[in-house]
Amino acid sequence: MNLTPSSAASLGEAFRKIVELYTGEEDQLLSTDFYFQPLRESGKLAVFNDNDEEIANVTIPEWKDYAYDIFYDEVTADITTAMEAANTNGDLERLAVWMPYSFVLVDEERETIADLLLVDDDTMLVKKGLMVGLSEELNKFIEDLLND
């Protein structure tokens, strides 16, 4: 699904709201994860913290009544693109949140659909083909190690 520039800006706004609420000094670190809940019927994206408090809310018209079974795949791609833009802008580095923390896509019942981002110390793992080919790489690494 191709988002309009205004829908892409709305997703960016959701990340700006998160950063606005969770920016602070090191002595003000909070402990939370972030849960992204898209609603197909309304096109709404709500973002919640660990206390089930809604911290951001935007509407993405392209998501409204999306009729295909790949809804969550499309939403994952859209949110990941916005998240990568926020990371490129340095916004995510300003979050005053205890590590590890994650961004998680959830359904209407708040069941996990996908882990979008995991941040742990100096490691930031954005899930966009992150695990693709991992077992092949590990097998090659072990084979090379054993051959030495």
Image (tube, rainbow, N blue to C red):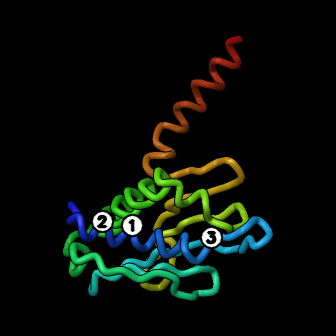
Where does residue 123 sit, x and y in percent of width and height? 65, 48
**Left or right for 12, reference 131:** left
**Left or right for 100, reference 17:** right
Residue depicted at 21% across the width and 73% down the height: 62
Residue 1 visible in the displayed image: no
Give the SS element for disc 1.
Answer: helix
In space, the residues marked 3 and 1 are separated at their CA atoms by 16 Å
Residue 83 appears in which quarter of the rendering? bottom left
Please identify the quadrant where the C terminus is shown: top right
Within 10 angstroms of label 2, few (less than 14), some, or many (20 or more) residues? some
Q: Which residue is mark 3?
A: 23
- Mark 1: amino acid: Gly
Residue depicted at 35% across the width and 58% down the height: 77
Q: Are marks 1 and 2 in contact (CB under 8 Å)?
A: yes
**Left or right for 20, reference 74:** right
Judge by depth and name the residue closer to the eye, 143 or 74.
74
Q: Which residue is mark 1?
A: 12
- Mark 3: amino acid: Thr
Q: Nearer the viewer, mark 3 or mark 1?
A: 3
Residue 3 appears in which quarter of the rendering? bottom left
Please identify the quadrant where the N terminus is shown: bottom left
- Mark 2: amino acid: Ala
In space, the residues marked 3 and 2 are separated at their CA atoms by 22 Å
Residue depicted at 53% across the width and 81% down the height: 48
Give the SS element for disc 2.
Answer: helix
